[in-house]
């Protein structure tokens, strides 16, 4: 066991996904000594862990990539409109090599505790190996979806076959051929993996508690001409994403849904559906605020399911009725609904008869229905947004515990800082736009804001920054108020923590728009960070 506490890093970053990698790159450019601590054995974060069959991005690859380096974006070649996980991981690997990032990353190491040490004016981070890392700043780049959630069904230990969680998929190939497989969940991970597993397994049983809306991806190889056109003006294209509502380029709304003509309404919905992906969400200004307008999309999606699924009862079960369209993360599918037309796929509705326990040969519902399977897949999601931060015992000034402070829900200023936790930053933290955007845009914006802030502090001979309680209270109130203007809080989604028993129900991402949010952050910086408590750490006599 070594003690790194005598090495005073300027910053300790936790997490080596796209956030931590870019943060390290930037801090090095400032000439700061930084180290990254990462649980995984390599870079990539989400794309290191989520190796399940069918995993790919749902934001187009030309946008779901770093924009900070012109040579990188010109030279890297994406092969598909929505890249698959191996290609995205290859990209992360390339970035790490290209900028020689690995030499400052400690892999295979989990941070378990972090505390503000007032005496030395810095953070101490303790790892599962018992090492301490000391840094003047602590930058949490933990990701929003990095803590997989597996329900505590009794009996799992007795199951004789293999089981997997989509968010912790093995590195070795998993072969389902000839097996009867059961999958629990019908969120994005399941919707991507079900068609793939169905194509391989002897039989696939899908256990569905709640159906989800999915729009077609219409994935395809990227056309050389369209790539050339984007790359010719990549800077302008990226600028479009930077100042957009959701962090990616998409067509503007054509107006309020009930004020446009019937013809335009229908044709625009159809056009966007045929385009694929998230552009459907911005068809009208009020898709997410007017129940009446939203209902048009619910009906549209139900019609689509009925067209794609042969059996009317299966189509009905697959049609969401419990939440407005787009208020849970919209899934982007490839052949998902058609998969239920296969003879080797069965949909089991467990909405009124939940899974009771796992047995040696499968599972049994509370109502006594038994299902035998050879292998089980948990596509049951994550303890999102707050889970990764609360997974570490973080203590600020006066030994204030983050877990205690957030007992009733997260409290942050701008989703970047927390009052009582000086010199700590949270990349894509709770109450920032994060998961409602193209996260590459959100990550770059946060990393660049933190970099600018540290540069400014250095120029002003300051080395301590902390959110004030007043600004934090106002930001929390604002994020909740903006959320309440939308239909989002109506859904039992992971956005409100509904998927984790006992988690306080709080709509956590900032839904006011990525462009609006960027303006707010820029204004705070432009005003000399006056809304923060700034100072110098006085050495103890
Ligand atoms: P992550 O990639 O989650 O990386 C965080 C890292 O921190 C992880 O490697 C983790 O091991 C490490 N870590 C966490 N806690 C600790 C600790 N205590 N100690 C040490 N290390 C720790 N977003 C989009 O915008 N578009 C998409 O298409 C998209 N697709 C997705 C598909 C899947 C399957 C999932 C799960 C998410 C997807 N997302 C997508 C969201 C995705 O998480 C982000 O786009 C992005 O990859 C997040 O990068 P990050 O570095 O912030 O976090
Ligand atoms: O997780 P989820 P995910 N018994 O929480 C069910 C990103 N992502 O991993 O809805 C039975 O969405 C649960 O049912 P219910 C994206 O942001 C992106 O799929 O709670 N079922 C639900 O069906 C996404 O939103 C992509 O009733 C149980 C499912 O498990 C986020 O990650 C791909 C259960 C969980 O769905 C999370 O997606 C993958 C229980 N006890 C992920 N507990 C792209 O496409 C849970 N469920 C880019």
Image (cartoon, grey):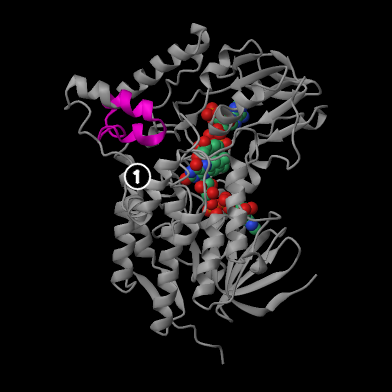
When the figure is inspected, residue 109 is found, relative to residue 183, above or below; the finding is below
Could you tell me residue 78's position as x and y percent? 52, 45
Task: Residue at 56% x, 60% y: name it.
Answer: 20
When the figure is inspected, residue 374 is found, relative to residue 537, above or below; the finding is above
* 111 to the left or right of 457: right
Could you tell me residue 53's position as x and y percent? 64, 33
* 399 to the left or right of 280: right
Q: Which quadrant of the structure image shows residue 239? A: bottom left
Q: Main secondary structure of the magenta part?
A: helix
- Start-end of magenta stretch: 269-293
Query: Is residue 25 visible to the viewer in this orientation of the structure?
Result: yes
* 255 to the left or right of 451: left
Task: Residue at 19% x, 20% y: name it.
Answer: 262
Q: Secondary structure at mark 1?
A: loop
Name the quadrant of the C terminus. bottom right
Q: Which quadrant of the structure image shows residue 190? A: top right
| Viewer-proximal residue among 128 and 173 | 173
| Viewer-proximal residue among 410 and 80 | 80
Give the residue at mark 1. Answer: 249
Which residue extends farthest front? 225
When the figure is inspected, residue 485 is found, relative to residue 177, above or below; the finding is below
Labels in figure, total: 1
Query: Is residue 428 visible to the viewer in this orientation of the structure?
Result: no
Label 1: how many Cα within 10 Å (few below 14, some 14–19, many 20+): some
Task: Residue at 74% x, 36% y: name it.
Answer: 173
Which residue extends farthest bottom? 541
Magenta segment: does it hold 181?
Answer: no
Magenta segment: does it hold 292?
Answer: yes
When the figure is inspected, residue 127 is found, relative to residue 121, above or below; the finding is above
């Amino acid at each position: 066991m070594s003690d790194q506490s005598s090495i005073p890093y300027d910053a300790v970053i936790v997490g080596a996904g796209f956030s931590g990698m870019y943060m390290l790159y930037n801090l090095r450019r400032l000439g700061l000594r930084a180290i990254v601590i990462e649980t995984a054995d390599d870079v990539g974060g989400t794309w290191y862990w989520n190796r399940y069959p069918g995993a790919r991005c749902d934001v187009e690859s030309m946008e779901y990539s770093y924009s900070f380096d012109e040579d990188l974006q010109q030279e890297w070649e994406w092969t598909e409109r929505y890249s698959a996980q191996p290609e995205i991981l290859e990209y992360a690997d390339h970035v790490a090599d290209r900028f020689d990032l690995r030499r400052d990353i400690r892999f295979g190491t989990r941070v378990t505790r972090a505390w503000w040490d007032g005496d030395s004016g810095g953070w101490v981070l303790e790892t599962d190996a018992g090492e301490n890392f000391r840094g003047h700043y602590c930058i949490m780049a933990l990701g929003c979806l990095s803590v997989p959630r597996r329900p505590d069904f009794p009996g799992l230990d007795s199951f004789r076959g293999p089981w997997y969680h989509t968010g912790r998929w093995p590195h070795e190939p998993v072969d389902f051929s000839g097996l009867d497989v059961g999958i629990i969940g019908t969120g994005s991970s399941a919707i991507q993996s079900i068609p793939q597993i169905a194509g391989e397994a002897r039989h696939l049983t899908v256990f569905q508690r709640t159906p989800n809306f999915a729009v077609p991806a219409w994935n395809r190889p990227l056309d050389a001409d369209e790539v050339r056109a984007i790359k010719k003006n990549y800077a302008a294209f990226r600028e479009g994403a930077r100042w957009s509502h959701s962090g990616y380029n998409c067509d503007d709304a054509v107006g309020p849904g009930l004020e446009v003509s019937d013809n335009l309404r229908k044709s625009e919905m159809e056009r966007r559906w045929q385009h694929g992906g998230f552009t459907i969400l911005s068809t009208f200004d009020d898709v997410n605020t007017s129940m009446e307008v939203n209902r048009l999309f619910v009906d549209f999606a139900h019609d689509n399911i009925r067209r794609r699924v042969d059996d009317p009862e299966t189509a009905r079960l697959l049609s969401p009725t419990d939440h407005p369209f787009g208020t849970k993360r919209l899934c982007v599918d490839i052949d998902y609904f058609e998969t239920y037309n296969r003879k080797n796929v069965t949909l089991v509705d467990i909405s009124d008869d939940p899974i009771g326990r796992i047995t040696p040969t499968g599972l049994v519902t509370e109502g006594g229905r038994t299902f035998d399977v050879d292998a089980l897949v948990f596509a049951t999601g994550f303890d999102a947004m707050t889970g990764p931060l609360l997974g570490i015992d973080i203590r600020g000034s006066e030994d204030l515990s983050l877990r205690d402070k957030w007992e009733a829900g997260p409290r942050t200023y701008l989703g970047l800082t927390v009052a009582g936790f000086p010199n700590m930053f949270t990349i894509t933290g709770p109450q920032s736009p994060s998961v409602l955007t193209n996260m590459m845009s959100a990550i770059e914006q946060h990393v660049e804001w933190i970099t600018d802030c540290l540069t400014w502090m250095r120029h002003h001979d300051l080395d301590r920054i902390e959110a004030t309680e007043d600004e934090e209270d106002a930001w929390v109130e604002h994020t909740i108020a903006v959320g309440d203007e939308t239909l989002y809080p109506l859904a039992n989604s992971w956005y409100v923590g509904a998927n984790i028993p006992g988690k306080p129900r709080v709509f956590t991402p900032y839904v006011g728009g990525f462009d609006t949010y960027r303006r707010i952050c820029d204004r705070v910086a432009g005003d000399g960070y006056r809304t923060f408590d700034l100072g110098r750490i006085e050495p103890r006599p």
